[in-house]
Image: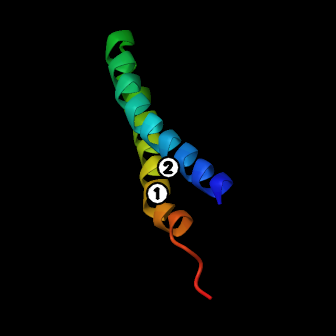
Amino acid sequence: MTAIIATVCMLTGLIHCAETLSYSLRLAGVRTGKLAVSLSLTRILLLVSRTANMCSPLWQAPSPG
């Protein structure tokens, strides 16, 4: 039980870390002048993060049965 809770907390932390890193990636792209690359990488990172966030209730909910 404790291992499951630790795994869920770690995965949730990774999701929020990816959200935060996407904003810093966008800022770095503006500063280096590679805005198109920065925006595409930001969108990919946010898509993965939001998909994982959408699937997180499946990890957190108890299995039926």
Reply above or below: 20 against 43: above
Extreme-bottom residue of the structure = 65
The x, y position of residue 21, in whole percent, is: 43, 29
Is 32 or 24 nearer to us in this picture?
24
Is 62 or 56 nearer to us in this picture?
62
Q: Residue at x 49, y 40 (%)?
A: 13
Q: Circle 1 is placed at which residue position?
A: 51
Q: Residue at x 62, y 50 (%)?
A: 7
Q: Amino acid at mark 1?
A: Thr
Q: Categorize mark 1 by other alpha carbons within 10 Å: few (<14), some (14-19), many (20+).
A: few
- Locate residue 5 relative to residue 41 in the image: left or right: right
The x, y position of residue 9, in whole percent, is: 53, 47
Q: Residue at x 49, y 63 (%)?
A: 55
Coloration of the structure image: rainbow
Q: Residue at x 37, y 23 (%)?
A: 24
Extreme-front residue of the structure = 2
Is 1 or 39 nearer to us in this picture?
1
Is 39 or 61 nearer to us in this picture?
61
For the N terminus, which image quadrant? bottom right
The x, y position of residue 27, in whole percent, is: 33, 20
The x, y position of residue 15, in whole percent, is: 47, 44
Reply above or below: 63 against 31: below
Reply above or below: 44 against 26: below
Q: Circle 2 is placed at which residue position?
A: 48
- Locate residue 43 relative to residue 5 in the image: left or right: left
The reply to whether callout 1 and callout 2 are in contact (CB within 8 Å) is yes
Secondary element at image label 1: helix
Reply above or below: 52 against 14: below
Q: Categorize mark 2 by other alpha carbons within 10 Å: few (<14), some (14-19), many (20+).
A: some
Q: CA distance from mark 1 to mark 2?
A: 5 Å
Secondary element at image label 2: helix
